[in-house]
Image: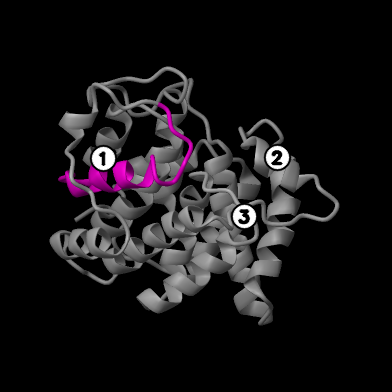
């Protein structure tokens, strides 16, 4: 999960000021966590509470999104989600926005199997992003994470994702000159996957993701969640990323990691 959070933080300063190169300072004083991290952490809290109390995950996700989300009103929520967050009677709003995919990394870390990752992803996603493309983007991300956690090779993950979710038939070099901001899952998740597929390390995956431009913090979060599960997050990068979070968010991250330990921190 910290992989997604770091990707969000690194990409935050480039969301409206894209950079088309991998040569940039990873962390900067202009970096900060955004809605991607807030909702990733809120989803993790929902999973924790659902497991402990044996309660419905979808219901817990609504509760924790609406409890944690409003504490960060300037985090950068999309218009649809912002309305949902303060609606007295929140309902799914048929969104295919990439917010569905950027917040599900905890599902991939909590799941033991692909089937469970799908189940958790749909519960966390369907409360807002009920459009088929929104559900697909989130599911593909969670599935790739659980596969990576379980030692599945990158070529196998690529083959699985391309056959079942997205026909990724481009390279980053091919799309970099023309790729622009896109808030949809179908216009963001395949690109985030390719950033992972072309990576040689966690940091390289993040640099790949940011280098194509577009919705940089969200692409960084999606790529980071998958790459963190595959490569592991180097300790120095983890510590720097955690330093941007406030104590409340940091506590939830540590609580989740204690419940669902992952031994690849430090990188392959």
Where disc 3 sits, the SS reads: helix
| Whether residue 7 can be seen here | no
Residue where numbered disc 2 is placed: 82
In which quadrant of the rendered image does the N terminus lie?
Answer: bottom left
- Counting other residues with Cα less than 10 Å from the Cα at mark 2, is it few (<14), some (14-19), or many (20 or more)? some
Residue 93's disc number: none
Q: How many marks?
A: 3
Whether the magenta-drawn stretch holds residue 194 is answered as yes
- Side of 119 relative to 130 (left or right): left
- Counting other residues with Cα less than 10 Å from the Cα at mark 3, is it few (<14), some (14-19), or many (20 or more)? many
Sequence order check, earlier mark of 3 and 2: 3
- Side of 169 relative to 251 (left or right): left
Whether the magenta-drawn stretch holds residue 72 is answered as no
Please give the name of the residue rendered at 65% of the width and 60% of the height, measured from the top-left corner: 127
Magenta-highlighted residues: 181-203
Residue where numbered disc 1 is placed: 203
Sequence order check, earlier mark of 1 and 2: 2
- Side of 187 relative to 68 (left or right): left
Q: Position of residue 92 (x, y in %)?
A: 67, 56
Q: CA distance from mark 3 to mark 2?
A: 15 Å
Please give the name of the residue rendered at 54% of the width and 52% of the height, measured from the top-left corner: 40
Q: Position of residue 224 (x, y in %)?
A: 35, 46
Residue where numbered disc 3 is placed: 42
Q: CA distance from mark 1 to mark 3?
A: 25 Å
- Counting other residues with Cα less than 10 Å from the Cα at mark 1, is it few (<14), some (14-19), or many (20 or more)? many
């Amino acid at each position: 999960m910290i992989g997604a959070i770091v990707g969000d933080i690194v990409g935050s300063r480039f969301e409206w000021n894209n950079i088309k190169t991998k040569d940039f300072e990873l962390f900067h004083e202009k970096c900060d966590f955004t809605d991607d991290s807030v909702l990733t952490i809120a989803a993790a809290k929902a999973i924790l509470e659902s497991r402990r109390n044996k309660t419905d995950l979808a219901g817990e996700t609504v509760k924790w999104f609406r409890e944690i989300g409003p504490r960060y009103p300037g985090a950068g929520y999309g218009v649809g989600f912002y309305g949902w967050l303060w609606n007295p009677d929140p309902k799914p709003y048929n969104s295919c926005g990439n917010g569905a995919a950027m917040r599900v990394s905890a599902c991939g870390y909590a799941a033991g199997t692909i089937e469970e990752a799908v189940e958790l992803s749909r519960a966390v996603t369907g409360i807002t992003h009920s459009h088929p493309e929104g559900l697909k983007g989130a599911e593909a991300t969670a599935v790739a994470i659980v596969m990576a956690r379980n030692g599945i090779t990158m070529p196998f993950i690529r083959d699985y994702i391309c056959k079942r979710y997205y026909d990724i038939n481009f390279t980053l070099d091919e799309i970099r000159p023309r790729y622009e901001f896109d808030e949809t899952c179908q216009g963001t998740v395949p690109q985030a996957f390719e950033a992972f597929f072309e990576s040689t390390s966690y940091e390289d995956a993040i640099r790949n993701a940011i280098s194509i431009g577009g919705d940089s913090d969200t692409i960084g979060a999606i790529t980071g969640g998958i790459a963190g599960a595959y490569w592991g997050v180097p300790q120095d990068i983890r510590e720097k990323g955690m330093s941007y979070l406030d104590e409340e968010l940091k506590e939830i991250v540590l609580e989740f990691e204690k419940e669902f330990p992952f031994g690849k921190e430090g990188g392959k």
